[in-house]
Amino acid sequence: MQHTNRICINRVTSLQVPDLSEDSYRLTVSGVGVQTTTFTLHDLMNKFPKVEIATVIQCNGNRREDFHYLKDDVPAFGPPHWVAGAIGNSRWAGVRMRDLFKAAGLDVDAVSLRQAELPPGATNVSLMGSDHDEVGNHYCCSIPIEKVIDPFGDTIVAYEMNGLPIPRQHGFPCRAVVPGHAGARNCKFLERITITPNPCQDAGNWKQYAVHAPDVTLEKLSEFEKHACDLKKDPVVQEMPVQSMITKPSAGEVLAISGTPDAPTVKVQGLAWGGGGLGINRVDVSLDGGKNFTRAVLLPPEVKQRRGNVWSWTFFEKEILIPPSLVHELKRGKPVSLELTSKALNAAWNVQPPTPDVTYNAHGCCVNHWYRVPVTVDPRVRVNSLPASALNEFENKPSGGKFKSPFRHLDPPGTHYKPSTPEVGGSSGDTGSAASSSK
C-alpha cells in the first residue's frame, strides 16, 4: 500500500509505529488445535519455504469521501476521509501462515483434503499487532480459518515488500498479507496469531470495519458499546467487492483534442480489481456519465495468477470516440464537458452499482459505485493541463471530482480551507496513516 506519512483523526488507525528490531522480534502462534509456539524472524526466513504473492491491499474505507456529508455539518461516516488512494498493489514475500499452523501441530493438509475435521472451536484466526493506543489496546482483527489453511488462499506472514525488508511504516519486520480481503485484515507489526472460536472482540475488528444498513446512523456507531449486541449482528468485512477507477485523465483536467478533427477521441486509462480472488471479465467505459458504455481493452497481467486466485489488479485503457454532436461544437471552437465513467464486472459477473446510494453505510465501507471523472476537451489548447485552482489539490479526488467542503492537503489535520471566492473542486483531507493496519 502507498500511504502518506500523516496523522489520521481515526483513533483506531492512528496507532504509533512500534520500534521493533529484527533480533528481538517474536511471533507467537497459539489457540485451539495448536501447541503454543514462538518463532523468531530467523525461523520464519530459514525454516519454511519462502513464497511470493502479488496482491492488491485496499482499505475497506477506500472512496468513502464520496459519501461525505448528509447534512452541512454532519459527517455521513467516520474518519479517515479516504478518497480513492487507499489501495496499492505490491509483491509480498514470506511464509505461508498454514505452514506455521502445521509446525504448531495442526494437520492443515488433512483438513484441506477433508480427511480430517478442524478441532471444535477452531473457526477464526485472530491477528494482533504490536501497535497499540495510549492505554495499551493493541490492534486486533480476525479472518476465517478456512482462508488460512486453504493451500490456494495464499495467506502469508510477510517479511519482504517488493524484494526488500518491509518498510517500517508498512509493518516491519512482519505483517499478515491476506489477499482479496479488506486491508484491515492485513495486520501490520504482527505479534500474535491465535485460533479462536469467535472473531476478535477488540475495538479494531467491529468498530470501523462492518457494513451496516443505511438506517444505522453515525451517532449510533459513536455509542458502540451501548448498541454492540445489535451492531455485531453484521459481520466484519472480509472479501472486498469489485472495483474500478480511472487514473488518467485527472478530475478537472483540460484536454487537447486527440485523433483527427472528424474523429476526435479521449484516451481513458485505469485499473480494476475483482476482489476476493475473482479476476476481471470486463471493464466498460463511457464519456457521457454512463448513458453509453463501450468495452475497454484489458492489458495483459504482469504476473500470471490462477483462476480464483487473481489477487492483483488489472489495467485497462480505451480510445473513445467523441460523439458527433460534440464534434460539431469542437469544430466551432467551443470546449465541451465530458464525464468519464468506468464500471467493472468480475469473474462472477458482479458489477459495480451506478450510485453510492446503493451501498451507503455510516462506516463508509466497501464503496464501489461507478467511478466518474469530469474533464473538458478544449480545441483552443495544445497540451493537457489542470486548471490553476487545482494545482495545490490532491489529483486524487472523490468520484465526480469535487469535495463538498473543500480543504487543502497542506493544512493541519482537522483544519478546513475556506476560499475567499468560490472554487471548483477542493482538496482531500488526511488520506494516509503510516501506522494503520490497512488498515
Image (tube, helix red, strand yellow):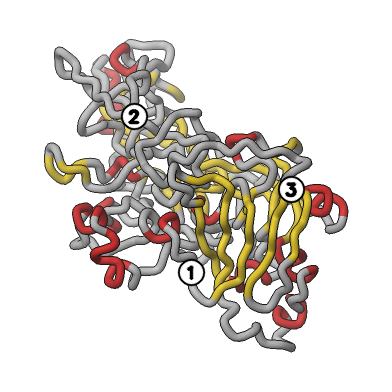
**Which of the two labelled residues, at mark 1 and mark 2, occupies the earlier sequence position?**
1
- Residue 263 is situated, as x and y percent measured from the top left of the image, at 40, 29
Q: In the rendered structure, which amino acid carries the disc numbered 1?
A: Pro
Q: In the rendered structure, which amino acid carries the disc numbered 3?
A: Ala
Q: Could you tell me if residue 281 is visible in this image? A: no
- Residue 347 is situated, as x and y percent measured from the top left of the image, at 53, 63
- Residue 428 is tagged as 2
**Which of the two labelled residues, at mark 3 and mark 1, occupies the earlier sequence position?**
3
Q: Could you tell me if residue 402 is visible in this image? A: yes
Q: Is residue 430 above or below residue 40?
A: above
- Residue 258 is situated, as x and y percent measured from the top left of the image, at 44, 23
**Depth check, front residue: 399 or 184:** 184
Read off the residue under disc 3. Answer: 93
- Residue 397 is situated, as x and y percent measured from the top left of the image, at 35, 32
The quarter holding residue 264 reads top left
Read off the residue under disc 1. Answer: 199
Specify whether 78 is left or right of 188.
left
**Depth check, front residue: 299 or 133:** 133
Mark 3 to mark 2: distance in Å?
A: 33 Å
Mark 3 to mark 1: distance in Å?
A: 26 Å
Residue appearing at x 40%, y 59% in the figure: 351
**Which of the two labelled residues, at mark 3 and mark 2, occupies the earlier sequence position?**
3
Q: Please, what secondary structure does the residue beneath circle 3 have? A: strand
Q: In the rendered structure, which amino acid carries the disc numbered 2?
A: Ser
Q: Please rate how many residues cluster around mark 2, counting C-alpha atoms within 10 Å: few if below 14, some from 14 to 19, many from 20.
A: many
Q: Please, what secondary structure does the residue beneath circle 2 have? A: loop
Q: Please, what secondary structure does the residue beneath circle 1 have? A: loop
Q: Please rate how many residues cluster around mark 3, counting C-alpha atoms within 10 Å: few if below 14, some from 14 to 19, many from 20.
A: many
